[in-house]
Image (tube, rainbow, N blue to C red):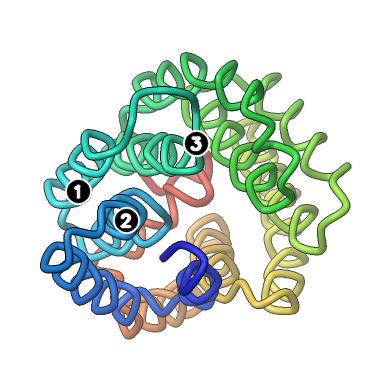
Amino acid sequence: MGGRSGAGEILALYLGELDELGRRARLQLADAGERGDVYVATSISTALSNLAWLAAGDIDSARRHALEGERRWTRRGFHLQHYWGLLSSAHADLYVGDAAAALKLIRARWPALQASLLMRVQVVACEALHLRARACLAAGELGAAAHDAGALDALDAAHAPALAALVHAGLAARKGDFARASATLAAAAPRLDGVGMALHARAADHARGVLTGQSALSDRASSWMRAHGVAEPAALTALLIPGCGLA
């Protein structure tokens, strides 16, 4: 990770290459351990690559690596590694359905995240707002989720409105407007594919198939996700798009 491979890890995740992401993570962790490279070991353990363990259904490893990564890093200040630790731990909470724990953690660390100025980095702002919106949505705090979706829509990033659309779909489903949720997901999928976020696009297809009873659509999305290292497509879809009745 870090400056040498961070972009590659992000790209692999968004493209849905979670099996490859997990393979890289294991190799890089082993290499970092042999060399005593705390920076790389911490970054791999806590960054987006941590999601590969969740996708494989290995929740214990995802949590363990996140905790080990944070313990290795300094407690002074709030660095990118602290943000990644927040992201990984909140993802694990959301994956197992503990939205309250995820939201509590996010809100506890949000002031430090803002004070660090990391939110001025476009990719961090998108990820962090999408994370908090998903946690709020999963916890039933629809007003707060809508607020963060609006903030995402306002960001000058090609993928931000596409991520916001997933939140809007979840909000519509939570309110019982399944037709609107389905239409929003249908429009979001090609936009997500257009910005290289195939994993999120297939999650949108899976959610839409479930909402509309189109089993062929959800089955195709599930098959694609399993072929790319996702053990439980419904669980990962619920992590990425809460509120659509998947978990």
Name the spot of residue 83 as percent of width and height, x first: 48, 37
Q: Which circle's residue, 3 or 1, is located before the other in the chain?
A: 1
Question: Residue sitting at 38 percent across and 19 percent down?
Answer: 100
Name the spot of residue 163 as percent of width and height, x first: 68, 53
Can you tell which quarter of the image residue 115 is in?
top right
What is the distance, in whole Å, between disc 3 and disc 1 at their CAs? 18 Å
For mark 3, give the secondary structure. loop
Answer yes or no: do the residues labelled 1 and 2 have beta carbons within 8 Å? yes
Name the spot of residue 43 as percent of width and height, x first: 36, 54
Quick check: 102 left or right of 154? left
Quarter holding the C terminus?
top left
Q: Amino acid at mark 3?
A: His
Quick check: 174 left or right of 19? right
What is the distance, in whole Å, between disc 2 and disc 3 at their CAs? 17 Å
Name the spot of residue 131 as percent of width and height, x first: 55, 39
Image mark for residue 65: 1
Front one among 102 and 180: 102
Can you tell which quarter of the image residue 102 is in?
top left
Q: Which residue is mark 2?
A: 50
Answer yes or no: do the residues labelled 2 and 3 have beta carbons within 8 Å? no
Figure check: 137 above or below 205: above
Question: Residue sitting at 54 percent across and 55 percent down?
Answer: 211
Figure check: 177 above or below 184: above
Q: Which circle's residue, 2 or 3, is located before the other in the chain?
A: 2
Q: Amino acid at mark 1?
A: His
Image mark for residue 79: 3
What is the distance, in whole Å, between disc 1 and disc 2 at their CAs? 7 Å
Q: Amino acid at mark 2?
A: Asn
Quick check: 69 left or right of 186? left
Front one among 73 and 106: 73
